[in-house]
Image (tube, grey):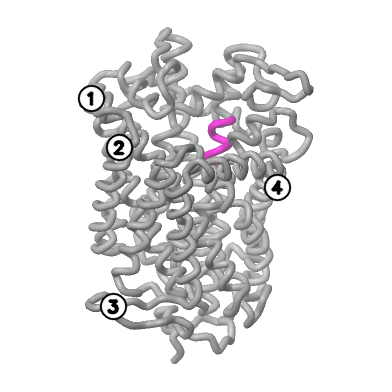
């Protein structure tokens, strides 16, 4: 039996692709002293050397690097905002079409496959890998930002282009500003980003578990390229996936370090500066390394379940300690507002809210797309045995509802404090500390703020851990059991890239610029992947 068939972990199901390619056939195996390696040639070499060169360039010429990063950010967000928004719409539509189509009956892994994880473990890992740090960072600050800009109305510069940051046409009343601000926030965290993840995860699971191909990004393109996918077309796809994942993770790690630093400053007086943020990244990356060594079951799975439990307790606390009845009522109102404004917010053309489109939506979609190889492959690894319909509903709709609840309770509490209680401190606080400022107005603020810091750190760890696992799988040609030192190498490099970009002249702006830049070419990869998914599902026995 070939290595490809072995990777399926059971008798290959009907519909398997007939290929002579064996997992690892292009790999280079050996040892450097006591350290073993099993790396794909040339994906590992090109990816690793390019990242090393990038780190060296940013450290040696920080001002020039910052200028390049700023130019990339403005050019991509301004020139390709319609492309990011239109592509994300396609991903949502395809997911919904597949759910209601006969293809929904296809089981990932074949007709007799059974799930590897319980629903609780599965959902915990989906959510922890997908959005943990982001929701902690933006759960309070984004609704407040959109509410304020919507209430502030529109402003037009001398060139006729709007200079305000309000979504759509802003709002005429305070109540409308609250609904529009919450709708815009939910828009960035619900259907569209999870559809991006679902597309990548479904393609990987389908072509690995059902078609018998390696668990790597290039496998999804077999219907397009055929056997050429094992050559340079596939090499380029996998290298792009490594870059997108690495910089997407680095951005999230940078955001997490800034927020953790702000939280420790509020609780213990830790100075807010890059030195402490670097120390935090080093410390948390070290914890991630420990989790990496423990493996998927004992590491990521356990941490994800613990973190989801803590997050749920914090969620319940904010709900109960705040204006409970109002918050529960607002959840339904904000969900209705999201559905009401969804067509306008997701329109890629005919918009004049340029700052919101480019500075918020384009950045977010590029960020989610850069995370999609990592989250998609991780979801694929833990989703064997689910039907396609069950998979999409669980990956698209359920996490979207969780995001609606989180944004509504945390963002709604902050807005309520400003509007109804006159507590303006939360609105005036710096973005990384707004979560902790919101908690200050509730009982047990020191305890809940400390819990918030713990959540940020553990989400940081699970993202770094599972991201290292995924990058290593891609760079090892689809092998899921490559030597441990390789995963350690990528885990260390994620932290290093985050540190280098954080220390560069642009700081967080540099992180965001690299996300945008790597997200653009990978958007094209995802669009082609949509065609491959449809062809792959069409050839499956049902």
The first of marks 2 and 3 along the sequence is: 3
C-alpha span from label 2 to label 4: 38 Å
Q: In what element is the residue under mark 3?
A: strand
Image location (x, y in percent) of residue 337 = 60, 28
C-alpha span from label 3 to label 4: 45 Å
Q: Which residue is mark 2?
A: 275
Region in magenta = 184-191
Q: Any magenta on residue 170? A: no
Asked if disc 2 and disc 1 are in contact, CB closer than 8 Å, the reply is no
Q: Any magenta on residue 190? A: yes
Q: In what element is the residue under mark 4?
A: helix
Q: Which residue is mark 3?
A: 32
C-alpha span from label 1 to label 4: 44 Å
Q: Which residue is mark 4?
A: 83
Q: Main secondary structure of the magenta part?
A: helix
Q: Is residue 360 left or right of residue 132?
A: right
Q: In what element is the residue under mark 2?
A: helix
Asked if disc 2 and disc 4 are in contact, CB closer than 8 Å, the reply is no
The residue at 52%/23% (across/down) is 145
The first of marks 1 and 4 along the sequence is: 4
The nearer-to-camera label among 3 and 1 is 3
């Amino acid at each position: 039996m070939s290595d490809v068939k072995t990777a399926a972990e059971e008798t290959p199901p009907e519909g398997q692709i007939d290929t002579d390619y064996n997992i690892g056939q292009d790999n280079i195996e050996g040892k450097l002293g006591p350290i073993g390696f099993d790396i794909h040639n040339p994906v590992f070499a090109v990816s690793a050397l390019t990242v090393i060169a990038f780190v060296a360039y940013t450290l040696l010429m920080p001002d020039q690097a910052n200028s390049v990063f700023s130019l990339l950010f403005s050019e991509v967000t301004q020139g390709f905002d319609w492309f990011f928004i239109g592509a994300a719409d396609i991903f949502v539509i395809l997911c919904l079409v597949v759910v209601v189509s006969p293809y929904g009956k296809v089981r990932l892994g074949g007709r007799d496959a059974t799930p590897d994880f319980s629903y609780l473990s599965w959902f915990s890992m989906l959510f922890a890998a997908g959005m943990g740090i982001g929701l902690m960072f933006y759960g309070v600050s984004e609704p407040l930002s959109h509410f304020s800009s919507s209430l502030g109305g529109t402003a037009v510069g001398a060139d006729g282009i709007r200079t305000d940051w309000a979504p759509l046409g802003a709002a005429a009343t305070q109540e409308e500003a609250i609904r529009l601000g919450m709708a815009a926030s939910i828009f960035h965290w619900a259907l569209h980003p999870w559809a991006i993840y679902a597309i990548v995860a479904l393609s990987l699971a389908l072509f690995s578990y059902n078609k018998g191909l390696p668990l790597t990004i290039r496998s999804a393109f077999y219907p397009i390229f055929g056997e050429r996918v094992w050559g340079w077309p596939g090499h380029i796809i996998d290298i792009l996936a490594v870059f997108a994942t690495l910089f997407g993770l680095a951005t999230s790690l940078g955001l997490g370090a800034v927020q953790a630093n702000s939280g420790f400053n509020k609780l213990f007086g830790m100075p807010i500066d890059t030195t402490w943020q670097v120390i935090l990244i080093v410390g948390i990356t070290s914890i991630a390394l420990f989790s990496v060594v423990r493996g998927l079951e004992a590491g990521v799975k356990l941490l994800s379940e613990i973190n989801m439990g803590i997050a749920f307790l914090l969620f319940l606390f904010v709900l109960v300690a705040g204006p409970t009845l109002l918050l529960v009522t607002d959840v339904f109102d904000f969900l209705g507002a999201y559905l009401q404004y969804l067509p306008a917010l997701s329109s890629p053309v005919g918009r004049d809210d340029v700052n919101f489109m480019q500075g918020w939506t384009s950045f977010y979609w590029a960020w989610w797309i850069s995370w999609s190889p990592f989250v998609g492959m991780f979801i694929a690894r833990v989703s064997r045995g689910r039907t396609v319909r069950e998979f999409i509903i669980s990956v698209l709709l359920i996490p979207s509802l969780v995001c609606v609840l989180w944004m509504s309770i945390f963002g709604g509490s902050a807005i309520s404090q400003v509007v109804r209680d006159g507590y303006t401190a939360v609105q005036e606080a710096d973005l990384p500390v707004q979560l902790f400022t919101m908690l200050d107005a509730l009982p047990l603020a020191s305890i809940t703020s400390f819990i918030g810091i713990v959540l940020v750190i553990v989400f940081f760890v699970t993202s770094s851990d599972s991201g290292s696992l995924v990058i290593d799988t891609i760079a090892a040609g689809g092998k899921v059991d490559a030597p441990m030192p390789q995963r350690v190498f990528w885990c260390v490099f994620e932290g290093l890239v985050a540190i280098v970009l954080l220390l560069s002249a642009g700081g967080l702006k540099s992180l965001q610029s690299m996300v945008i830049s790597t997200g653009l070419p990978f958007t094209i990869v995802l669009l082609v992947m949509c065609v491959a998914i449809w062809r792959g599902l069409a050839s499956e026995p049902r």
